Image (cartoon, grey):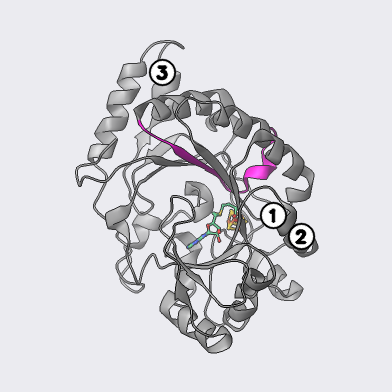
Amino acid sequence: MKDTFGRTIDYLRVSITDRCNLRCIYCMPPGGVDWTPHRNILSFEELLRLCGLMAGMGIRRIKVTGGEPLVRRGAADFIASLKKLEGIQTVTLTSNGVALDQHLDKLISAGLDGLNISLDSLREENFRRITGGDGFEKVCSFLNRIDSLPLPVKINCVPLRGINEDELANLAGLAKTSAAAVRFIELMPLGRAGSFSPVPGKEVFKLLEKEYGKLIPYPGTLGGGPAVYYSIKGFKGRIGFINALSDKFCETCNRLRLTAQGLLKPCLSSNIGLDLRGLIRGGPENSGGWELEEAVRALIARKPWGHTFSTWQDQEKTEHEAGMFSTGG
Ligand code: SAM
Ligand code: SF4
């Protein structure tokens, strides 16, 4: 599948819930939100039908995300079913790691191809400040298991000015002691994130070179995303940067996003979307496949060239009111 700019669209991020067991300060309001009622969330059967349809159209990689995907019962079985879809080559998961100990064996048996863990602090009190919750020890015990796992692990960190900027070198150090890729993601001004300041990727880069020596460009890619990777002498893992704002990489964007409510979005910053839930619930079970396909193609034709997070200051706030938990990170 190509969009109007000639980009191949082969990557789908599927949010399976907008619920979460944490309240990260840049993602969710501290008091939580009104969760979408279950009836308005796509069932796993509906999700599989849509993923199968899109696999037939050229989607090859699926990332399962949320909210926190592991709070939805049956997440591992859903992943096992995605793995069986014809055309799908890899299925990965993004999780905050808090409930991972209960699910890890099942996820591995399901054939999960990669695991992304979000971790913004290595200090318990700061972890609690950022996430609003407990679970630090559980995430740490997972970190100790990384090298024994049969799948690649990436650790995602969002550098926040004045909040975890003094911890970035320590977080990068996780790639010294384990084979994980530690990635620094520039904060994007979605929802509550607009009230925090990012630490730009280039600043993190300099800070790490000062601490660990030269960051050597890594020629390979690790997965289908936009991260740029580096090696450091003596490190087992890699360091990655996703400089979504300072180094806009939209010209290589290959993805679509499906929210838990069934809205297919062509771009994270986009205020357009296709109501797939309405379409699949509106017609008989086994009809309308070609109509869905046509609708998806029409949406792809409207995929914008790039995101509209141009600078941190001049955001069109109304467009980006929803935090990442609702769109799916
Ligand atoms: N709950 C899971 C987790 O935290 O990994 C999956 C969903 S979460 C929305 C996915 C990723 O989005 C996390 O790594 C989180 O740090 C990141 N994220 C959330 N809000 C963001 C923002 N405004 N800018 C950049 N990354 C953000
Ligand atoms: Fe939950 Fe992930 Fe958002 Fe944190 S970043 S509140 S863990 S969805």
Q: Residues within 10 Å of mark 1 (few under 14, many from 20)?
A: many
Task: Label 3: state its secondary structure.
Answer: helix
Q: Residues within 10 Å of mark 2 (few under 14, many from 20)?
A: some
Apparent side of residue 144 relative to residue 233 in the rendered image (left or right): right
Give the x, y percent position of residue 17.
Answer: 58, 41
Corner quadrant of residue 64: top right
Q: Amino acid at mark 2?
A: Gly
Apparent side of residue 223 relative to residue 147 in the rendered image (left or right): left
Whole-number angstrom distance, CA of label 3 to CA of label 2: 41 Å
Q: Nearer the viewer, residue 63 or 36?
A: 63
Instruction: Look at the image and say whether residue 61 sits in the magenta stretch.
Output: yes
- Residue shown at the point (57%, 78%) measured from the top left: 233
Corner quadrant of residue 116: bottom right
The answer to whether the beta carbon of the residue marked 3 is less than 8 Å from any atom of ligand 1 is no
| Residue 223 can be seen, yes or no | yes
Q: Are marks 1 and 2 in contact (CB under 8 Å)?
A: yes
Q: Which residue is mark 2?
A: 135
Apparent side of residue 131 relative to residue 18 in the rendered image (left or right): right
